[in-house]
Amino acid sequence: MTEIENNSKKVDSSDIIMTLCQSVASVITSATSQETRYAPLVQKITKTLLTPDIGTFVMFTGSFSGMVVINFPKETAMELYTSYLRNMGIPECEMAKNYTQDEVSNTLGELMNQIIGNFTRQISEELHIRIDQSQPKMLVLPREVQISISVNLDNPKYGKVTFHTEGGNVFYVELAMDDTSFTALRDFESHSTLSPDDILEQYTQEN
């Protein structure tokens, strides 16, 4: 599990978006058994957008608030969908053939739910705070449509990161959040709780 370094005594929005990127890459790589990596640069943006072909978003609240948007071109959506189901042993004949089918957007919504769950768990454990998430929302969008989506934040900060799949496709992660920072008042250790995946991996190694 990736940890936010607390020996610097300060964690800001740049550290938080890094944790989000690591959660996205880790969850999708694990779910699909296909490597997913992110670009080394964060693009500064002024608003979050749902863009074609499938846009997904989740809002979170608690010690700080924000929203994560992930936009998938249709080629990427189908690659991740088929890789995810293939990794679970689902035969190709039972898979959806078109990105507009509900099964595809539902699968991406499930991946989004896992990503944000991983992200909020890590942030909560490392910083001793509380973050709650909403249910993911998904929209299949025509090529000519973009939807501006906003959340009520004080002094918001926005960032966009490009991700690359093993199949050579891309998708885009956008984060809008309070421009906040956390400064340690005293030395502390992060909480450590095992996720179901951690428990299963530990059991497999022991047996």
Image: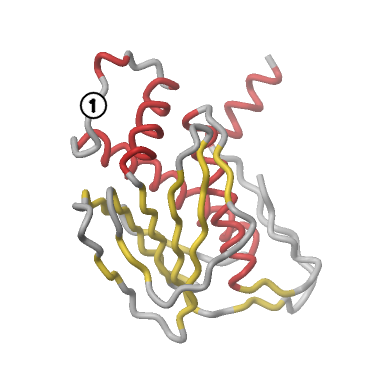
Q: Is residue 108 left or right of residue 97?
A: right
Task: Farthest residue to the front: give it.
Answer: 144
Q: Amino acid at mark 1?
A: Ala
Which quadrant would residue 188 be assigned to in this image?
Answer: bottom right
> Which residue corresponds to the image point at 38% horizontal and 59% vertical from the top-left?
69
Position in image of residue 124 (x %, y %): 56, 60
Q: How many marks?
A: 1
Position in image of residue 176 (x %, y %): 44, 70
Which residue is nearer to you in this view: 49 or 15?
Answer: 49
Position in image of residue 185 (x %, y %): 74, 79
> Which residue corresponds to the image point at 50% horizontal and 68% vertical from the top-left?
159
Position in image of residue 55 (x %, y %): 30, 53
Q: Is residue 58 above or below residue 159?
A: above
Which residue is nearer to you in this view: 55 or 125?
Answer: 55
Under tag 1, what secondary structure? loop
Picture quarter with the N terminus: top right
> Which residue corresponds to the image point at 26% horizontal and 22% vertical from the top-left?
95
> Which residue corresponds to the image point at 28% horizontal and 70% vertical from the top-left?
148
Which quadrant would residue 102 be assigned to in this image?
Answer: top left
The residue that label 1 is drawn on is: 96
Picture quarter with the C terminus: top right
Q: Is residue 7 above or below residue 26?
A: below
